[in-house]
Amino acid sequence: MYLCPACETGNRAWLPPKGVLKTVYNYRRIGEGKDSGLLAAQLQKSRYLELLPIQHLKSLPRLKVGNTPVYNVSQHFHLEGMQLFVKDDSQNPTYSFKDRASALVSAYAREKEITTIVAASTGNAGSSLAGICASQGQKAIVFVPAKAPMAKLTQILMYGAKLVPVDGTYDQAFDLSMEVSKEFGFFNRNTAFNPFTIEGKKTVAFELFEQFVGKMPARIFVPVGDGVIISGVYKGFEDLLKLGLIETMPEIVGVQAAGSNNLASNFQKATFAIKPGVTCADSIAVDIPRNFYMACQFVDKYNGRFIEVSDEEILEASTLLSRNTGLFAEPASAASLAGFLKMKTQNSIPEKSTNLLLLTGSGLKDLKAVQSSIKLAEPISATLQEAKKILEL
C-alpha cells in the first residue's frame, strides 16, 4: 500500500495524488516518565530510532548518511547583525539530500527482505537510490527523463543500477515506474508515494535540533519541487513539538523556481492548474507536485510561506555562494540562497534574526547549468610575459 485506499479512488493522472500517508508514532509512550532533557538525550543516543519506521539501526546503510555540517556564513554576506547558516547536505554519500530518504527506504526493504527497489527521478533521487542499494546489496531500477543531466545518469550507471531513460517528462517517468512496480511487485521509492521518503528526509530536523542545542533558527529556506523535502522538514519538527522538545515551529520558506512553480502558484487555490515551464534548476522542475496536499497543509498550519525566484536569481546565488563560502551547490540547491536574498531585499526578514539555508545537492551534479556563469580564459604560451598579461600584473 502506498496511498490511502479511500482517498486515492478519485485521483487523476494530471493532478497531484491525494491520500499520501503520514507516519504516526505513539508520542505519549515515547515521552512517558521523562523530562525534556532526559528524553532528548535518549533520542540522541538511539539516533531517533523511536521516531523511525524501522526496527534496528543496523538495517541502515553503512555509508555515512546525514550528520552533515552546519556553517555560519554570516560574515560573507555583510548582514549587519542578521545571522545566516548553511546546512550542507551535498556531503552525503551520493552528494544530495535524497540519501536521507533512500537510506530509510532501503533499510525498511532490508528488514522486509525486499531485494529490488524502483524509483523515478530527474537524477538525484535515482543516483541516491542506486548508490544506497549498491552499499546494501540490493537491486535498483531507475526511470529518468532522457534529458536528465549526464553527471547524474553517470552516477546511476556507475553504481550498477538498471537505468531506463524515458522519452518524456519526469512526471511520465514517474507514472511508468509506478506501472512497472505494480506489474512486477517491486518496492517503489518514489517521492511521496512511499511515505518513508518523508520520514527519511525529516531526520534533518533532528540534526538541526542537536546542532542548535534546541534553540532553532527563526527561519529555514528549503528548495521545493515535489513538496517532499519541505514536508519532511515540517514532519521532523512536528515530531519534536509533539514530544515537547521544542516550543515553536520555525518559519519555513519553500523556495521554488518561477519557471516551474506549480506548488507555489497553486497554494491556497480552489482548483489545481498545471503551468508547464522550464528552469535551470532541474531537480525542482515538476509539473505535478506529488506531495502537494501535505506540503500545503503543513505550510498553512504552521504559517510558512512560498517564494518564487527566477533562473537569473538562482544562478547569481549559486555564484555568490561558491565565491564567498567555498560551497558549490547545484542550481536547485542554490535556490534557497536566492530566496533568502530576495526576502532580504524586500525587507521581509527581521533584523538580528537567525536564518538557515538547506543546501540539497552538489554543483558537480549539473555542470552544464552554470556554464553561463563562468568564463574560461584562452590558453597562453608558457612564458612569464604572457602570464603577467593574463594576471594583469
Image (cartoon, rainbow, N blue to C red):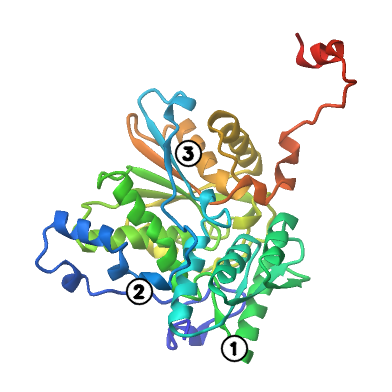
Q: Quadrant of the C terminus?
A: top right
Who is closer to the viewer here, 334 or 293? Answer: 334
Who is closer to the viewer here, 343 or 169? Answer: 169
Q: Nearer the viewer, mark 2 or mark 1?
A: 2
Measure how far apart labels 3 and 2 are at the Cα level: 38 Å
Q: Nearer the viewer, mark 1 or mark 3?
A: 1
The earlier-in-sequence mark between 1 and 3 is 1
Q: Residue at x 54, y 47 (%)?
A: 308
297 vs 374: above or below: below
- Looking at the rendered structure, the kind of residue marked 1 is Lys
Q: Which mark is residue 182?
A: 1
**Residue 330 appearing in the image:** no
**Disc 1 element:** helix
Q: Residue at x 20, y 62 (%)?
A: 243
- Looking at the rendered structure, the kind of residue marked 2 is His
Left or right: residue 237 versus residue 149 is: left
Measure how far apart labels 1 and 3 are at the Cα level: 41 Å
Q: Are marks 2 and 1 in contact (CB under 8 Å)?
A: no
Return the x and y of residue 334 as percentages of the image width and height.
57, 43
The earlier-in-sequence mark between 3 and 2 is 2
Q: Are marks 1 and 3 in contact (CB under 8 Å)?
A: no
Return the x and y of residue 196 as percentages of the image width and height.
44, 72
Locate residue 85: give its quadrant: top left
Q: Which mark is residue 56?
A: 2
Q: Residue at x 35, y 53 (%)?
A: 207
Q: Which mark is residue 143?
A: none
Left or right: residue 183 versus residue 51 is: right
**Residue 87 appearing in the image:** yes
Dot 2: within a 10 Å radius of its alpha carbon, few (fewer than 14), some, or many (20 or more) residues? some
Q: Which mark is residue 340?
A: 3
Who is closer to the viewer here, 282 or 294? Answer: 282
Who is closer to the viewer here, 157 or 82? Answer: 157
